[in-house]
Image (spheres, rainbow, N blue to C red):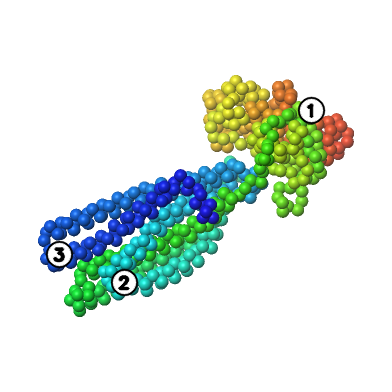
Amino acid sequence: MVKKLVKCIREYKKASIATPLLVSMEVVMECIIPFIIAELVNRIKDGCEMKTIVMYGLILVVMACLSLMFGSLAGVTCSTASCGLAKNLRKDMFYSIQNFSFENIDKFSTSSLVTRLTTDVTNVQMAYMMIIRMAIRCPMMLIFAFVMAFVMGGRMAFIFLVVAPILAFGLILVIAKTMPLFNKVFKKYDTLNSSIQENIKGIRVVKSYVREEYEKEKFGTAAEDVCRDFTKAERILAINNPLMQFCLYTVMVFVLSYGSYTIITSRGLDLDVGQFSALLTYSFMILMSLMMISMVFVMITMAAESGKRIVEVLDEESSLHNPENPVYDIKDGSIDFDGVNFKYSKSAEKMTLSDIDLHIKSGQTVGIIGGTGSSKSSLVQLISRLYDVTEGSVKVGGRDVREYDLETLRNQVAVVLQKNILFSGTIKDNLRWGNKDATDEEMKEACRLAQADEFISRFPDGYDTYIEQGGANVSGGQKQRLCIARALLKKPKILIMDDSTSAVDTRTDALIRKSMRDFIPETTKIIIAQRISSVQEADLIVVMENGTISACGTHDELLESNEIYKDLYMLQNKTGGENNE
């Protein structure tokens, strides 16, 4: 895990190396200052001249300025290195997620990925900042201060050797108790973020069903759960403070009482006032260093779990890879399913698709119809290689899709998904997802084909109208038509419409199909629909049931030979007749 995280430092190595060096210089300056003060006190006691006092004063000022300068520079380089690491971690995780296949994405929830990109990265950033600064400063300060305390106080310094094991033992206990709690709490963070995400995304549904109180209660439960575990962890961590205070006061009482006794009984021969003042200062330094070390360990303990979660994303390898010598040219839009079996997970017992044999000629219009859960969407996702088949092969243009360069294949297979997604930005920005170099005229032409130009022209800003996140300020039908236009701009060899006209009326649906038939006749068109009217003019209609192909044929052929198709047709016509009455 550490090796993986260290690789993300990259261009911030210089700042990461400079910080410990600057901190070391700062510590040296801070540890020498009490020694010089002790010398000054002794000189004053011996009746030195004013020029000696001024000389020592100037030395102290210079050393204090140097300490301040080294500390300030260390703060700058430390913040540069830690913020840079956080930036690289987020960048690497985001890039890794972009390369995930659908199978990889299925392993992580959206809320979990958001938590890893935000809270977990922040924890690692804070820990790294502590490591390159405090984790260097505190041990060095501890060693330097102990050596100087031994030089100044002799045997009295051994009190620290008694106190240190007590602190170490307490620290080990704290870490052992808090580690499992932090492990649990970050998983609960995912649940909390999931609750927030679902609520905001579905706020219209929440309000329409008057479920605000239920959502508040659900969120409150998740927040209370996180709070409970964090409170328990914080209570354990709080033991650090009284333990440190106990050790601090123990040492101070010992140093003050025994030091005073030594000065009085030896009349300053074994320990003088200057040494005594320096010893007190070094005592504070040692104990503060121990306290800071305990804080560093606590932060590292918390960040360790976050680091594991980050590395899980970085180590996740896409289940889809380009072949060694990929094909970059797709001859046509013909599609062949040969003996295809497919399941989403290797551990799944049942196949999602079974014994699929289907052959589609280039330029054909194919309708796919079937009940909910019949695996219609799963079938078409194999064409653009969003998933790989478990057995058999899917061919496009006469070649197995696994032979193509992934980008080339997906650029020639445009998919209008069942769940339409628009991004925040203007209508033009969204349309250019289909073709980043599309001209205004090309965009208008695609929108005319998708029957979107009519409503866009009614907007005050036309194609420059701003689309809110998720397309919140346009209707479902408008969103679908914009997504169809975006797909048409790709000028693909294969166009897949996964129930993408469900929110438009039958007249608009018919106009969209007519436009496609007239203006892109060479493009293979696959239409997944619930309405038979959307597919009845197709060259070939595929009826699916429970992950298998029940029948293939034209509308007339299926009415005569397939009971599923016939029942669906009769049901929809009957419903339509009753509605008309």
In percent of width and height, residue 559 lies at 86, 33
Mark 2 closeness class: few <14, some 14–19, many ≥20 residues within 10 Å: many
Q: Please identify the residue farthest to the top as the structure is shown.
A: 441
Whole-Å distance between the Cαs marked 3 and 1? 107 Å
Question: In the picture, which quadrant includes the C terminus?
Answer: top right
Q: Is residue 373 left or right of residue 212?
A: right
| Residue 196 or residue 331, whichever sits in front | 331
* Chain-order first, disc 3 or disc 1: 3
Instruction: Please name the amino acid that badge 2 sits on.
Output: Ala
Q: Is residue 36 left or right of residue 314?
A: left
Instruction: Please name the amino acid that badge 3 sits on.
Output: Ile
| Residue 354 or residue 10, whichever sits in front | 10
Q: Are marks 2 and 3 in contact (CB under 8 Å)?
A: no
Q: Residue at x 17, y 56 (%)?
A: 55
Instruction: Please name the amino acid that badge 1 sits on.
Output: Glu
Q: Is residue 26 above or below residue 419?
A: below
Which residue position is annotated with label 3? 44
Q: Is residue 188 above or below residue 516?
A: below
Which residue position is annotated with label 2? 157
Q: Is residue 143 left or right of residue 277?
A: right
Q: Residue at x 42, y 59 (%)?
A: 296
Q: Residue at x 70, y 26 (%)?
A: 512
Secondary element at image label 2: helix
Which residue position is annotated with label 1? 537
Q: Residue at x 77, y 41 (%)?
A: 393
* Chain-order first, disc 2 or disc 3: 3
Q: How many labels, in total?
A: 3
Q: Is residue 19 above or below residue 155?
A: above
Secondary element at image label 3: helix
